[in-house]
Amino acid sequence: MEAKKKRRKKSVASDVCAPDVVLDSPDHVTAFEMRLADFLLHRCAATVITVADVKDIVWNEQDSNLVSRMTFELAEQNPKTKFEDILQVTNDAWNHFPHKRLNGLAPRDMVERIRADGDFTPEARPDFYTLFADRFPETPRVVKMRGHDWSWEYPAVFHTRRSELSSMHEKDEELMSEGNSGSDFENIERELLRKVSIVAAKATFDENPLMFDAAIMLARDAFEEDETALTRRILETSIYEARKLVPPVFSIGTDLLPWGFVDNRPFLLLLGEYATLVEVIDGPQKAISHYQELLALNPNDNQGIREILATAYVKTNRLEELLELDKQYPDDMMAGLKVGALLALYKLGRLDEARSRIPEMKERFLHVLQEILKTDHPQPELIPGRIKVGGDDEAWFYWQHQGTFWMATPGARDFIREAIA
């Protein structure tokens, strides 16, 4: 470790053009590299980072948030340098240098790197989290950021492992979307790759249940194998370990874990995964408190939990609570919440209020109201992971979730038919 620190304390510029490197042409060192070296040396002097380090960070990136992390890290350590200037140079680096996951785009620069460093091997290069390991905590924790906003923080090794799992998961999603198309050999290869990612996730989870991404991957695999007890155990183990790290002063309903802090997202996704599992196994009544907790932690609800909760309220006839939820999101565009609230008003006999909403309903959700009135509901063409606002797929999905409750409510569809005539 000490040797590594000494290596990184050399001049930034020396890493661009070492004296023992013979250049075939004066263009070998690009103008951007020289500008970056000068910027790091004179305007980010408080950060011991070289041009080669920046290349390694960009090469090993696994998510688009990394350029923001790098920018904020440099800005925090070099407060006298304008944030906009740092952002500009990190963006230039992001676009100029090759990325491993993009199959080495920026090939000219890649060739130059190999020519300048005969020992260069992509797999051996440190990533962002390795280079800035001392800026991350030794163990996971939940810390107060500002006001009532809190955030999870993880050790550098967590981030590196999460990036690797994320890359595997993306490949798995692609394979799943392809189904069993292709030759027998391709299908076998696809299944083997999926199993490799699950083995990696299991090893990661067994080492530390706080690796929420691994817990989600394992739980989904177990659920697909109809092992619901194992699915529940995996998620509950991870959540149990996580809750032990939440400080006693953290108060749900007052304090928040905003989605805007990217390190909160794995935990919020874990809670969402568990809540939906509870609904599948134990029914919506049991799941409601879990959905409510998620909205209390992250009221902006980047996960769309409010729509799932609205449907749970409809299923359990907790209509007043549905209307209270509707008030919290007055300009919402989610059909499950807004059209569900219309149904709640009708079922409660508050017809004048229901009628007063019709103009807005016709403007935003006419396609959904028309779907309710259909006698047949064929499935439209669906794009995995996407729902088009105002599209046939949005209306069809709404019908799948709440349509039977319109059918089961006497006069409800006649009310809609008359309202939009």
Image: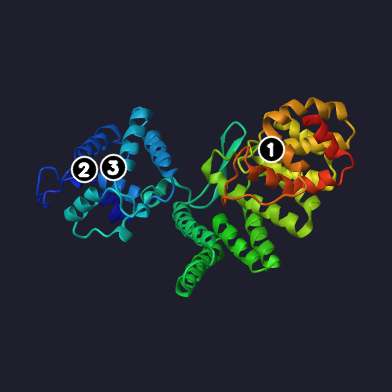
- The image shows residue 421 at horizontal and vertical percentages of 78, 30
Task: Say whether residue 53 is left or right of residue 230.
Answer: left
Q: Quadrant of residue 152?
A: top right
- Earlier in the chain: of badge 1 and badge 3, it is 3
Determine whether the residue tagged by mark 1 lies in a helix, strand or loop.
helix
- Between 340 and 40, the one nearer to me in the picture: 340
In this rendering, the label closer to the viewer, 1 or 2: 1
Q: Quick one: label 2, few (<14), some, or many (20+) residues within 10 Å?
A: some
- Earlier in the chain: of badge 1 and badge 2, it is 2
Tell me which residue sits at (67%, 31%) in the image.
Answer: 364
**Amino acid type, residue under disc 2 in the picture:** Ser
Q: CA distance from mark 1 to mark 2?
A: 64 Å
The residue under label 2 is: 11
Task: Say whether residue 350 is left or right of residue 333.
Answer: right
- The image shows residue 391 at horizontal and vertical percentages of 62, 40
Q: Quick one: label 1, few (<14), some, or many (20+) residues within 10 Å?
A: some
Determine whether the residue tagged by mark 2 lies in a helix, strand or loop.
loop
- From where the camera sits, is residue 209 visible? no
The residue under label 3 is: 96
Q: Quadrant of residue 38?
A: top left
- The image shows residue 420 at horizontal and vertical percentages of 77, 31
- Earlier in the chain: of badge 3 and badge 2, it is 2
In this rendering, the label closer to the viewer, 3 or 2: 3
**Amino acid type, residue under disc 1 in the picture:** His
- Between 384 and 57, the one nearer to me in the picture: 384
Q: Quick one: label 3, few (<14), some, or many (20+) residues within 10 Å?
A: some
- From where the camera sits, is residue 112 visible? yes
**Amino acid type, residue under disc 3 in the picture:** His
The residue under label 1 is: 367
